[in-house]
Amino acid sequence: MQRWKQYGGLLGLFAAFLAAGYWGFTATGGALPYAKRSAKALQRGVQESGGSLVDFGRGIVVAGPIRKGGMMIEFAAIVLVLVTLGIGLYIYVDRYSGFDDREPPVS
């Protein structure tokens, strides 16, 4: 495959995802609702306690909506799938590097 086709495909994919992200951002009202919610959460956090943002003494730090919404099993399943995928890709690339010692890579 020629290099310009690879970069062109990557650029097209990036543009498609950028457009989808922009559409999602504008469809949900943009940054203003998130900024208001974030400001309220920060103010509430400062008023309720002055503790640290990350406390590893409590165990694994998980976002409040996931923990309080009863979605810990789903969260753990997603983390497990991503870790397994990462380890699997690592093993795959290590075993099947794709190039023989006799064959130089195409530049």
Image (cartoon, grey):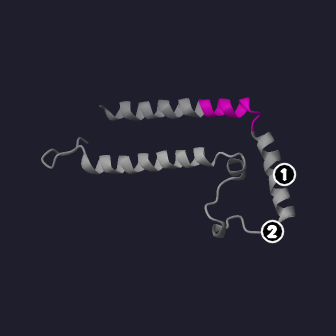
Q: Is residue 96 left or right of residue 32?
A: left
**Around disc 2, counting alpha carbons within 10 Å, would you say few (fewer than 14), some (14 to 19), or many (20 or more)?**
few
For residue 15, which quarter of the picture? Answer: top right
Q: Earlier in the sequence, mark 2 or mark 1?
A: 1
Residue shown at the point (12%, 47%) measured from the top left: 102
Label 1: how many Cα within 10 Å (few below 14, some 14–19, many 20+): few
Numbered circle sitting on residue 50: 2
Q: Residue at x 23, y 41 (%)?
A: 106
Stretch in magenta: 20-30
Residue 1 to residue 90: above or below? above
Seen as rendered, the residue at the extreme left is 102
Pick the residue in front: 82 or 11.
Answer: 82
For residue 26, above or below residue 93: above
**What quarter of the picture does the N terminus occupy?**
top left
Q: Secondary structure at mark 1?
A: helix
Estimate the spatial distance between the alpha carbons at disc 2 and disc 1, rounded to whole Å: 15 Å
Residue tagged 1: 40
Compared across the picture, whether 31 is left or right of 13 comes to: right
Q: Main secondary structure of the magenta part?
A: helix
Is residue 2 placed above or below 53 in the rendered structure?
above
Quarter holding the C terminus is top left
Tell whether position 81 is magenta.
Answer: no
Q: Position of residue 57 (x, y in %)?
A: 65, 70
Residue 27 is one of the magenta-drawn residues: yes
The amino acid pointed to by label 1 is Lys
Expressed as whole percent of the image width and height from the top left, the position of residue 79 reads 52, 49
Give the camera-side residue of 49 and 77. Answer: 77
Q: Camera-side residue: 93 or 32?
A: 93
Please report the residue visible at 42 percent of the width from the left and 31 percent of the height from the top. Answer: 8
Horizontal and vertical percent position of residue 21: 62, 34
